[in-house]
Image (cartoon, rainbow, N blue to C red):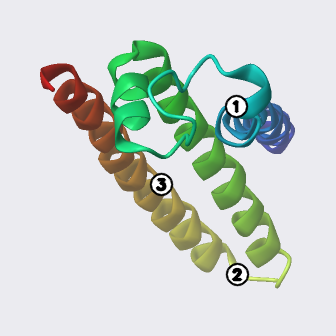
């Protein structure tokens, strides 16, 4: 039952990645057609555009959601690949703990970085 629930979350994380990465691709690579998120300069990575996007709370939240989905999707996929190697019960438990703690540390650090960038942009 637990594996089915985790697999469902794995699939949902893949859908979240698809949506938010699609949004990223539209903003960064189709802005010539859209022209709504890069008002200061035609180049999406121009500093003025980066600062303007960072001021919007939507982008901070979307970065954090994308980070969480990507970490879960990637680490759960790695876990499944490594479990197929026929590891013992102790190794599986150690791997679960390592991936969970590592993923949480990376999520906290990445969330802090996104939040700090948004806060810094609001002061500029």
Q: Toward the viewer: 88 or 95?
A: 95
Q: Nearer the viewer, mark 3 or mark 1?
A: 1
Task: Please name which of the two marks, 2 or 1, marks the residue nearer to the observer.
Answer: 1
Label 2 or label 1, whichever comes before in sequence order: 1
Residue in the image at 78% along x and 42% along y: 10
Q: Quadrant of residue 114?
A: top left
Query: Do callouts 3 and 2 mark residues in contact (Cβ within 8 Å)?
Result: no
Which element carries disc 1, helix, strand or loop?
helix
The answer to which of 51 and 61 lies nearer the viewer is 51
User: Residue 43, how many percent across, how many down?
Assistant: 55, 42
The mark total stands at 3
Q: Is residue 93 visible?
A: yes
Query: Could you tell me residue 29's position as x and y percent?
Result: 72, 43
Going by the image, does 92 lie left or right of 2? Answer: left
Residue 52: where, in percent of width, then height?
38, 24
Disc 2/disc 1 C-alpha distance (Å):
51 Å
Give the spatial CA distance, label 3 vs label 1.
33 Å
Residue ID for mark 2:
88
């Amino acid at each position: 039952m637990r594996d089915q629930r985790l697999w469902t979350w794995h699939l949902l994380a893949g859908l979240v990645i698809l949506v938010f990465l699609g949004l990223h691709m539209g903003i960064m690579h189709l802005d010539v057609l859209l022209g709504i998120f890069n008002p200061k300069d035609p180049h999406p990575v121009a500093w003025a555009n980066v600062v303007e996007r960072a001021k919007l709370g939507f982008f901070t939240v979307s970065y954090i959601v994308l980070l969480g989905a990507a970490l879960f999707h990637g680490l759960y996929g790695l876990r499944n690949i490594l479990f197929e190697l026929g590891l013992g019960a102790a190794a599986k438990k150690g791997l679960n703990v390592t991936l969970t703690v590592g993923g949480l540390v990376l999520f906290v650090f990445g969330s802090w970085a996104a939040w700090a960038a948004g806060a810094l942009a609001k002061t500029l």
